[in-house]
Image (cartoon, grey):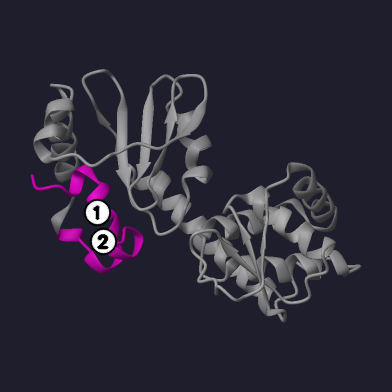
Amino acid sequence: MQTVLYDASFEGFFTAVFEIYEYRISQPDIQREGAAAVSLFGNTHTVHTDRNKAGRVIKKLQEKLYEDAFRQLYWSFLSAQPGIENTLFRYTRYALSSSQQITTDYSNADVLTIQQTAKKMGREKHRMEAFIRFQQTKDGLYYAVVSPDFNVLPLISRHFEERYADQRWLIYDTTRKYGIFYDLNTVSEVSIDFTTSPQDTAAIYDEKEALYQSLWQTYFNSTNITARKNMPLHIRHMPRRYWKYLTEKKPY
């Protein structure tokens, strides 16, 4: 087995796929740089991302797959689950070698894994879009700090760009140490040090932010009918791990 190292980008992955065919690597083990346990005496192929090579594979694959199936492939890549690159490679190889659509062949373990992983990503995307709550700083920036199970920031950027088109906002993923920033024109990825103390955080809030949060909590509590409270159902639709994002779940 030969380790194939790439830079963790989507184009880097498809460059790796191209070079596996180009160099006829028969038993590839695709790993992200920095995450692979590579033996000093092992056989390693290092990939340098090439947009032309990646584009050729992507174009061919898009010809073979329905649009929704290629979306599932991309979402599965973003999940960054252990071993997902090798699953994606086998899926890609199966698609390219088949004369028929493979996307509903759930007897194939890789097709089934991609479909299940994309579903998990879809649920996380939906929950982030529903549960993110912004806070306003003194300079008019709306920001939210999140730590989703998967890397869903690329998937939710359009939702927030369309919904908050007239506001500058930042959503920062503390797990993956990067964020998406909207400057009223475009969304871009940013890497910043977002480690602040409670005193520092309080100092950057807009003076009306505490009032807005209090009003929202009051509204939420006033519409919550105690006699109809169903906590198991509530938790099923709003798992506890998301409560830390919600203004209405903070101490009132």
Query: Does the stretch in magenta take in 218?
Result: no
Name the residue rendered at 77%, 51% in the picture.
58
Q: Can you name the residue that lies furthest to the bottom here?
A: 107
**Camera-nearest residue between 61 and 120:** 61
- Mark 2 is on which residue type? Arg
Name the residue rendered at 71%, 58% in the picture.
16
Name the residue rendered at 12%, 27% in the picture.
203
Magenta stretch prevailing secondary structure: helix
Q: Where is residue 146 shown, x and y percent of the image? A: 33, 47
Q: Are marks 1 and 2 in contact (CB under 8 Å)?
A: yes
**Camera-nearest residue between 214 and 32:** 32
**Which residue is tagged 1?**
243
**Camera-nearest residue between 50 and 184:** 50
Local crowd size for mark 1, using a 10 Å CA cut-off: few (<14), some (14–19), many (≥20): some
**Which residue is tagged 2?**
240
Secondary element under disc 2, as helix, strand or loop, is helix
Quarter of the image that includes the C terminus: top left
